[in-house]
Image (tube, helix red, strand yellow):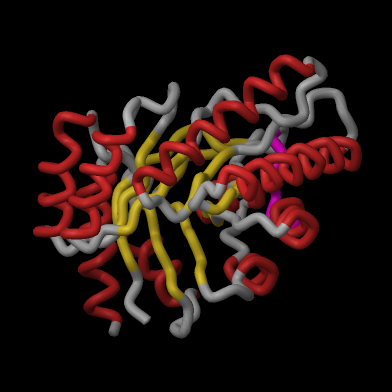
Amino acid sequence: MPIKFGPAGLGGVSEAIKNLEEYHKLGLKACEIAFTYGAYIKTKPEAEEIARAAEKYGISLSIHAPYWINLNSHEKKKVEQSKQRILKSLEVGTWLGAKKVVFHPGFYGNISKEETYNNIKKEIIELQKTRKEKKYVPELAPETTGKINVYGSVDEIAQLVKDTGCSFCIDFAHILAREKNYLFGKTLAKLGKGKEIHIHFSGIDYGEKGEKNHKKTGKEEWKKLLEALPKEKEITIINEAPTPMKDSVEGLRIYENLK
């Protein structure tokens, strides 16, 4: 099946449709809308207008929920605020026809890994219940994370998928930063069993504690990823480099030359 490539970021509401048209002209078929500091698409009519444009141009939408999320906080208020941010992303994502709401589940802090897992699992199960009651369309997609003090190893995300029925986002740049290895085989064996695989990718600088920052995606990195992916899956690759549109186009071109 063809792989869908696209950037992280759609721009503001006023430029969203123009940007979708540009992505289409470049051959891109995906886009992840970044709600980094909150859901900036405020009304149902403007979201539905963007959704119609995305459908017209054949672009699959997803959402990255705000970064201020910690389902493992000691403070109940912060957990509830985190859940409300995810639920708002699900609501707006439903208006947009988005497939996934990607989010970073939480931090370990001084809580054990086992207790952290149980806390996050409990909250995601509750989110799944609300999602079903509200008939929200996007799937919850906790993401593999790039810092060693942040919950989100391959095994942890795979266990969440198994225990809560949620979806997932594989960020191979984060896995490289966290494990010093892309772990393509292990990751796809644990998270590649369904028909769809949602991926984040870019170049990355990292150190002992994991991720430092994203950077331009190298050609060899693109080749390593594309050659490792299964051919029979529906795969979306969202690029998170500083120039995500340019890097997505380069990834698409490399993919076309590998076929």
Q: Quadrant of residue 9?
A: top left
Q: Quadrant of residue 218?
A: bottom left
Relative to 221, does residue 239 appear above or below in the rendering? Answer: above
Residue 176 in the image: x percent, y percent?
Answer: 57, 52
Residue 40 in the image: x percent, y percent?
Answer: 35, 25
Identify the residue shown where x is 11% and y is 51%: 21
For the question of whether residue 18 can be seen, the reply is yes
Magenta includes 154? yes
Looking at the image, residue 127 sits to the left or right of residue 21; the answer is right
Span colored in magenta: 150-155
* Nearest the eye: 47 or 175: 47
Q: Quadrant of residue 17?
A: top left
Identify the residue shown where x is 47% and y is 78%: 233
Relative to 197, does residue 10 appear above or below in the rendering? Answer: above
* Nearest the eye: 113 or 35: 35
Identify the residue shown where x is 76% and y is 37%: 123
Residue 223 in the image: x percent, y percent?
Answer: 37, 69
Q: Main secondary structure of the magenta part?
A: loop
Looking at the image, residue 23 sits to the left or right of residue 42; the answer is left
Residue 166 in the image: x percent, y percent?
Answer: 66, 55
Quadrant of image for the N terminus: bottom left
Relative to 193, does residue 211 appear above or below in the rendering? Answer: above
Identify the residue shown where x is 38% and y is 53%: 238
For the question of whether residue 250 can be seen, the reply is no
* Nearest the eye: 109 or 198: 198
Magenta includes 80? no
